[in-house]
């Protein structure tokens, strides 16, 4: 007797050429209609937390680092029509000028929506669902909300390879704890399990991804902007990550967070178990989307575990400060979990003590001025060249 097929997760994919308000509104309306309407997910009078991607320190929209404020603004307009208690936020470090430059205070003020830094209301200890964390601390704002709307940005990542829906929820824990986890979970696979643990503590009700202008290369802040022209939406954040990563030229199950979340039953990471509605995914796949130099999933599929571990070690990045680009903002010094990034005696730039460096790349992530470059060992560079060749040959 033939077994009944499992119901597939649905991911909506629509076109959006730019961040002009009217076009954003139309594209989002189409997304929501294809999902059955916003009312399907949100009851009138509910408390809603909107989790944006606002990387510290805050950057202007044109850099493509954060969820675009116009994108968020149009989603907030739809939410306001349902008489909801709405809070927008993230856990970030930024002065007032930086925040104004991000566009978020203005957007939230205009719509009369509360904009918060999550650290202002504190965090509560909660139990996790397996993986590597038994307990963690989650924002009180998130825990007290009936509905969580997740608004990630499509980007590559120099440590986790890809960052999207699951990784965006990393921002609901305290900044200091994030640094602590970077120190404790130095391998990508284990770090990704930790990300899924946090995701499991507060799974979003609905995820809508800003993939209009994505980031390729050494993201999440020092890569290059790449036009994709898409919006993705789904109840299943894992499935959304699978589709988004495929658009960016990855094999979805090569992304450790997607694979781990799929295996633990938090969503569908297998592209064959996902129904893409709206537009065709094949019309959006960017074949030459530039990945981080550590993105070598073909090694993981092809090599024995002991050889994969060796080559993975060869691919590790060592950060180095480019003195001519360093502005002396000292964000890298403040964020380093091991104190490996220091001020030079002349006080003009930072430097990195490689004996202390744990290769978490927090310094690279936080630098808005592309002053932290990533160096790779010769064997790692050779592996990277082989990967480029394999992609060109369609392997």
Image (cartoon, rainbow, N blue to C red):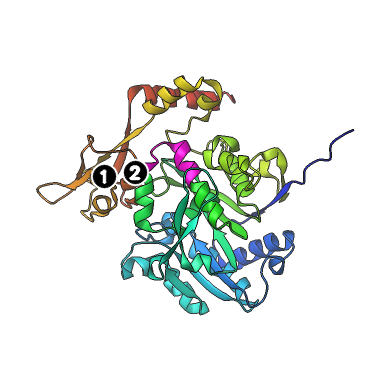
Helix, strand or loop: magenta stretch: helix
* Residue where numbered disc 2 is placed: 183
The span picked out in magenta is: 183-194
Q: How many marks?
A: 2
Element type where label 2 sits in the image = helix
Is the residue 291 above or below the residue 125 in the image?
Answer: above
Q: Position of residue 264 (x, y in %)?
A: 61, 43
Q: Residues within 10 Å of mark 1 (few under 14, many from 20)?
A: some
* Residue where numbered disc 1 is placed: 338
Residue at figure coordinates x 40%, y 56% from the top left: 55
User: Gap between marks 1 and 2, in whole Å?
Assistant: 7 Å
Q: Position of residue 104 (x, y in %)?
A: 44, 69
**258 sits left or right of 60 in the view:** right
Q: Position of residue 167 (x, y in %)?
A: 49, 50
Is the residue 314 above or below the residue 21 in the image?
Answer: above
In magenta stretch: residue 26? no
State which quarter of the image contains the N terminus: top right
Question: CB atoms at circles 1 and 2 under 8 Å apart?
Answer: yes
């Amino acid at each position: 007797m033939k077994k009944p097929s499992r119901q597939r997760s649905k991911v909506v994919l629509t076109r959006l050429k730019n961040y002009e308000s009217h076009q954003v509104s139309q594209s989002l309306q189409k997304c929501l209609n294809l999902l059955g309407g916003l009312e399907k997910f949100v009851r009138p009078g509910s408390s809603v937390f909107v989790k944006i991607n606002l990387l510290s320190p805050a950057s202007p929209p044109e850099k493509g680092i954060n969820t675009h404020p116009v994108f968020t603004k149009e989603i907030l307009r739809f939410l306001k029509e349902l008489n909801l208690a709405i809070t927008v936020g993230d856990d970030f470090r930024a002065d007032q000028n930086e925040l104004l430059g991000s566009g978020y205070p203005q957007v939230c003020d205009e719509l009369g929506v509360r904009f918060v830094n999550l650290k202002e209301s504190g965090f509560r200890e909660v139990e996790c669902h397996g993986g590597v964390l038994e307990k963690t601390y989650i924002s009180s704002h998130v825990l007290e909300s009936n509905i969580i709307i997740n608004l990630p940005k499509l980007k590559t990542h120099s440590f986790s390879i890809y960052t999207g829906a699951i990784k965006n929820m990393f921002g609901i824990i305290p900044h200091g704890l994030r640094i602590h986890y970077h120190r404790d979970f130095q391998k990508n696979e284990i770090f990704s399990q930790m990300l899924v643990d946090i995701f499991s503590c507060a799974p979003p009700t609905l995820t809508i991804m800003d993939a209009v202008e994505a980031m390729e290369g050494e993201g999440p802040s020092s890569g290059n902007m790449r036009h994709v022209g898409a919006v993705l939406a789904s109840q299943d954040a894992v499935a959304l990550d699978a589709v988004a990563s495929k658009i960016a030229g990855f094999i979805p199950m090569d992304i450790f967070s997607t694979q781990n979340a799929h295996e633990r039953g938090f969503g569908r990471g297998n592209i064959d178990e996902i129904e893409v509605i709206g537009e065709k995914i094949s019309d959006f796949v960017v074949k030459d989307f530039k990945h981080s130099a550590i993105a070598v999933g073909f090694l993981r599929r092809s090599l024995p575990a002991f050889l994969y571990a060796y080559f993975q070690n060869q691919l590790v990045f060592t950060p180095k400060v480019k003195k001519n680009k360093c502005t002396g903002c000292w964000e890298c010094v403040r964020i380093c979990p091991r104190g490996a990034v220091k001020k030079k005696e002349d006080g003009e730039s930072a430097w990195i003590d490689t004996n202390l460096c744990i290769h978490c790349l927090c310094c690279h992530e936080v630098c808005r001025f592309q002053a932290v470059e990533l160096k790779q060992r010769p064997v790692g560079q050779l592996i990277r060249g082989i990967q480029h060749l394999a992609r060109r040959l369609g392997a």
